[in-house]
Amino acid sequence: MTKNTFYTVCCLLVLTAACKKTSKEVPNKANDEKTVTYSDRFSELLNYPVDAVAFPRSADSTGQIKKVPSKDWTSGFFPGSLYMIYKLTGEKKYLDRAKEWTALVEDQKFNDRTHDMGFKIFCSFGNGYRLEKDSIYKNIIIQSAKTLATRYSDTVGATRSWDFGRDRWQFPVIVDNMMNLELLFEATNYSGDSTYYKMANQHAKTTLKNHFRPNHSIYHVVDYDTISGDVRMKVTHQGFNDESTWARGQGWGIYGYTMAYRYTKDSTFLEQAKNTADFYLNHPNLPKDGIPYWDFDAPKIPNEPRDASAGALVASALIELYQYTKDQKYLDFSDKMMKSLSSPDYVLQKTSSIPFILDHATGNWPKNDEIDGPLNYADYYFLEALVRRKNL
Ligand code: GLY
């Protein structure tokens, strides 16, 4: 597909969605006077001033931007989004700006206090390296994997997620941590050192064994005994309750096992990705537009906030899952979700200048933090899905 055809298709999708904007189910904040499309918003990201301690993470309903330093788990998404916009538009100014922001994440390569290394380093340096093959980027990725590897326990067979909560947990592993495996797998590809691959592979196997319920929904947190490696408890931190299914956690699982299959070709990982995706696709509480409430078991459905970040990352994962399974239902579902997310129901219609694309994402409901607004990782996975669809 040429660039022009791609944009024509995208505009048609947006127009079709705008014409069909009749469902009472969708959280519609659209301004009827002027429809803002997602590509109208690209320049807002470009023009946001580069600042080492002010990565834009989210915005509240008044347009107040939450700014974070590079150590925040979300710092890699903003440069990552700029790389994705460059891939969509071919305009070098986005690449240049992505590299400026990426440089500001480098200090995280030695931060051994968190498992979020993959989110931070791979969305920034990882995307940059794939585009330009700069050996400096490669060395930063390898150093980051080396740092992340210090959190791996042979006894547990996983990397530790959090250092906080030591009064409750000994060795907490959250399903989100599946996303950090991409950094480890690629570090082996870049360095030839199989240590990282082995850790990532074992982490995926341990998570597969302990994080899933029989119906293929996912526990958010599994805590392990540091001496025996046994499971101590299965609980939630960001979901509604311990037995509920937190929508973004389910998404991390779908994406994580699809990606783990990419590197290992282990059929049990692909099977898990399909089962986890099928739970999502067939859930009776999933709204018709494919974008979930923040938790599949949230008590006041349908009067609960959506999580566009979960929707976006699942839409992206399903494109890759389709590539391995050739099952058309995954691609069709991803297209449906992207049609929803590209519509004025989800694209930010605010005229104020904030560096985000999507609205209606939910960060941390139990803490009443970042509810039903823009989040930089919703944008990142939305843009990644556009790139993946374009490249199919
Ligand atoms: N990894 C943190 C989150 O998904 O909110």
Image (cartoon, grey):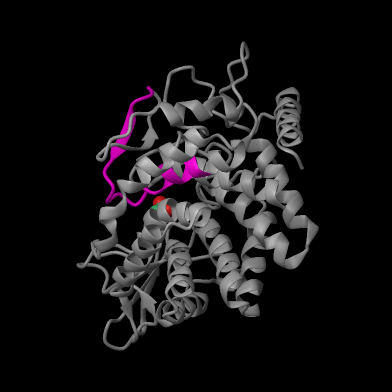
Q: Nearer the viewer, residue 116 or 97?
A: 97
Residue at screen point 72% across, 53% down: 392
Q: Is residue 167 above or below residue 291?
A: below
Instruction: Name the image quarter holding the N terminus.
Output: top right
Q: Is residue 206 above or below residue 54?
A: below
For the question of whether residue 355 can be seen, the reply is: no
Q: Nearer the viewer, residue 381 or 243?
A: 381
Query: Is residue 80 within the magenta segment?
Result: yes
Residue at screen point 50% across, 38% down: 305
Query: Is residue 259 within the magenta segment?
Result: no
Q: Nearer the viewer, residue 55 or 25?
A: 55
Percent across and percent down for residue 378 are: 50, 43
Percent across and percent down for residue 144 are: 33, 65
Q: Is residue 251 above or below residue 196?
A: above
User: Is residue 181 shown left or right of residue 13?
Assistant: left
Residue at screen point 36% across, 59% down: 136
Q: Is residue 110 above or below residue 342?
A: below
Outermost top residue: 33
Q: Which residues are magenta?
A: 62-83
For the question of whether residue 338 can be seen, the reply is: yes
Residue at screen point 39% across, 46% down: 364
Q: Quadrant of residue 320?
A: bottom right
User: Is residue 214 shown left or right of residue 368?
Assistant: right
Percent across and percent down for residue 183 are: 44, 65
